[in-house]
Image: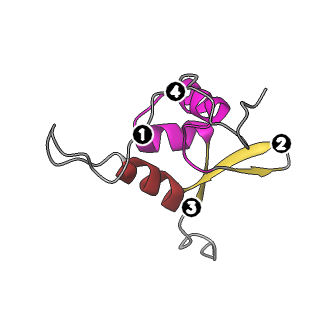
């Protein structure tokens, strides 16, 4: 008897699969999560999952046609960035 769920596409990927999907290491994707520079993710219990559509949107944000093209946005590197002011003050 065929599996009724076989036709369903995987809509959510765990960190290792999501990292392979976007061409990064799992550790780099974890760093993006820590610094807030990565794709949107969800927590299901203790598990982190990424929607395929969110991964595609994050990658597409960095799309450029040339080196002089400002593009729609940018994908920041996985490192600490200057804090964004909050109500006129820096967050701690």
- Relative placement, left or right, of 60 versus 55 is left
Foreground tag (4 vs 2): 4
Q: Around disc 2, counting alpha carbons within 10 Å, would you say few (fewer than 14), some (14 to 19), or many (20 or more)?
A: few
Quadrant location of residue 17? top right
Q: Where in the figure is residue 13, as x and y percent of width and height?
A: 59, 50
Foreground tag (2 vs 1): 1
Residue holding disc 1: 75
Q: CA distance from mark 1 to mark 3?
A: 25 Å
Residue holding disc 2: 46
Name which of mark 2 and mark 1 comes first in the sequence: 2
Badges 2 and 3: C-beta atoms under 8 Å apart?
no
> What's the magenta region?
15-40
Quadrant location of residue 89? top right
Q: CA distance from mark 3 to mark 4?
A: 26 Å
Residue holding disc 3: 10
Mark 3 lies on a secondary structure that is loop
41 in magenta:
no
Foreground tag (3 vs 4): 4
Q: Where in the figure is residue 32, as x and y percent of width and height?
A: 57, 32
Q: Around disc 3, counting alpha carbons within 10 Å, would you say few (fewer than 14), some (14 to 19), or many (20 or more)?
A: few
Q: CA distance from mark 2 to mark 1?
A: 26 Å
- Relative placement, left or right, of 84 versus 44 is left
Residue ID at (42%, 39%): 75
Q: CA distance from mark 2 to mark 3?
A: 19 Å
Foreground tag (1 vs 3): 1
Residue ID at (58%, 22%): 80
Residue ID at (46%, 50%): 58
Name which of mark 3 and mark 4 comes first in the sequence: 3
């Amino acid at each position: 008897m065929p599996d009724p769920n076989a036709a369903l596409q995987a809509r959510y990927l765990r960190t290792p699969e999501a990292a392979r999907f976007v061409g990064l290491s799992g550790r780099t994707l974890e760093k993006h999560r820590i610094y807030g520079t990565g794709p949107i993710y969800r927590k299901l219990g203790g598990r982190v999952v990424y929607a395929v559509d969110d991964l595609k949107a994050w990658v597409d944000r960095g799309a450029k046609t040339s080196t002089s093209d400002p593009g729609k946005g940018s994908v920041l590197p996985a490192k600490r960035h200057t804090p964004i002011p909050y109500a006129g003050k820096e967050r701690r």
